[in-house]
Image (tube, rainbow, N blue to C red):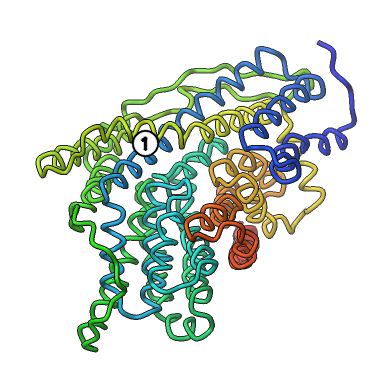
Amino acid sequence: MLIVSLPGGILSALAVIPIVSLLGGLTVLGWTAQRSAIVSFALAIVMSTFLYGLLPEAAAIAMLKGVLLSLFVLLIIWAALFLYLFLDRLGAIESIGQAMMRSAGLAPVRALLIGWGFSGFLQGFAGFGAPVASVVPLLQAAGFGGVRSAAAAMVGHSWAITFGSMGSSFFAIQLVTRIPGEELAPWLGALFVMPIIITGLSVLHILLGWRGLATGGPLALIVGAAMAATLWTSAQQGAGPIASILAAMVGSAILLGVGMTYRRLSGNKTVVAVAETGLLNIHLALLPYYLLVVLTLLAQTGPIAAAAKLVVLGVDLPSTTTLLGFQAAAEATYPRLRLLQHPAVVIALALFLTALVYRAKGIWPAGVLGRTLQLTYRRAKGTSITVLFMVMMALVMADSGMINALAFGLRTLVGPAFPLVSPFLGVLGAFMTGSNTNSNVAMGALQIETAAALGLLPALIAAAQSVGGSLGSGVSPDKAAIGASAAGIVGQEASIMRRALPYSLIAAAVVGVEVLLIGRWLSGAG
């Protein structure tokens, strides 16, 4: 096969073209995410073949890896989205939101409870902009303006995205970097401590200004510490798929307790007026989440965990070598899908048990499953195509040596300052694509290749990538569009972006400094 012979420095520079095409198609040319992903994948195939010497059979293996990895992640996304849409149709989401509205009397407590705790809870199992769409009307009902409500919802849920959607982004970064979850989770939990607290303080500042920050800041610090501890512990114990859910539930419970205590002690019975759904009480609405927590803990950490790990699905794939000598390792049982521990299976079981209870209670509108399936298909179709082609692009780039060449160039360009830059690569990828999962797929391999070249701990840099992606995804343009629509202020997306973006950039900068200091400490300790 004929390939074009080029110096290594030029190959390093050219390797960025598919990523530039992906981001440029979205931002400069105004393409859809699907079109950008397909074009960038095609570019990666052509370039890997004629510039980097990827043979046709090796390209086919890389694409098969992409399909298998995509299926692993998409099963989580489809199941999580179906659960959210199903419960939304039954009024469960509205019931939970209204219960929170009725229980919080103080403005800072309402702001934190709805914009930070409840939004993170929704992100924990849903995603797809659902936290923004659901929370903005509640914040407006609590008396906050449209732009402020949308910006607060965007920033407020961004801490929960990596472990949100039942861990889809968490699994994506594991799969593309080949770093086991037990190595990655402690670093993610540690790096999320400051973003959790910063996003809470940001919600207060967005909605209530400096006065609200002064009065509610101490509460945000205390609750944020409890949420961060819960997130870290959950991830550390193998419960990554529900880490955001548990952290949000702990934070919301504390805030609810503070709000209800204040109302009782002050004798203030005034609450924000909200309509009663008359459909589900709070515990029936929360039933599937109770079940998710119990089932996940049983599957991941309980006595059943050892047996559950024995059922593994995957494909054995051979190693490949390019004409330039770059070798991609052989894979055993790729992508190692532990069926009984997979979040989609846990969601399906929780949904089945919930359905039994709801039917017994007479809460089961005719045709609800069919309509929810149709809506899930419409909502997930575009995202599924995007994820598929982006993952195939990433695997083709990795197996052809393009990522390796790009990492060499990035090491030369940035050098020791790379830990500061690492979270912002995650922010950039997620901001442009609207998804932390997509950002992890597009940037994850590049991040750890660069880390290895610089002698940095790959798990630390992979964690920085996903934390940055979480912060960037929350304030991406598509979330601003959802927020504007939910607030009834379509056309003010730019104002929402200007209000929300600085807070996430500040949080990303703090993470970058943390990663730099930790990297230097580890180097000194080594």
Is 503 above or below relative to 297? below
Q: Residue at x 43, y 45 (%)?
A: 182
Rendering coords of residue 351 (x, y %)? 25, 38
Q: Nearer the viewer, residue 94 or 459?
A: 94
Q: What is the x, y in percent for residue 49? A: 76, 19
Residue sitting farthest toward the bottom? 266
Residue 444 occupies which quadrant of the picture?
A: top right
Q: Is residue 404 left or right of residue 488?
A: right
Q: Quadrant of the C terminus?
A: bottom right
Q: Is residue 32 above or below residue 126?
A: above
- Indicate the amino acid at tag 1: Ala
Q: Nearer the viewer, residue 446 or 470?
A: 470
Residue picked out by circle 1:
79
Q: Element type at marker 1?
A: helix
Residue at image location 66% in from the left, 18% down from the top: 59
Q: Residues within 10 Å of mark 1 (few under 14, many from 20)?
A: many
Asked whether residue 73 appears in the rendered view, the answer is no
* Quadrant where the N terminus is found in the figure: top right
Where 293 falls versus 343 (above or below)?
below
| Residue 65 seen from this side | yes
- Residue 368: x and y in percent read 26, 35
339 up-or-down from 114: above or below: above
Report the label total: 1
Q: Residue at x 70, y 38 (%)?
A: 22
114 relative position to 254: left or right: right
- Residue in the foreground of this view, choosing between 364 and 326: 364
Please state the horizontal and vertical placement of residue 429, each as a whole percent of the image. Answer: 64, 47
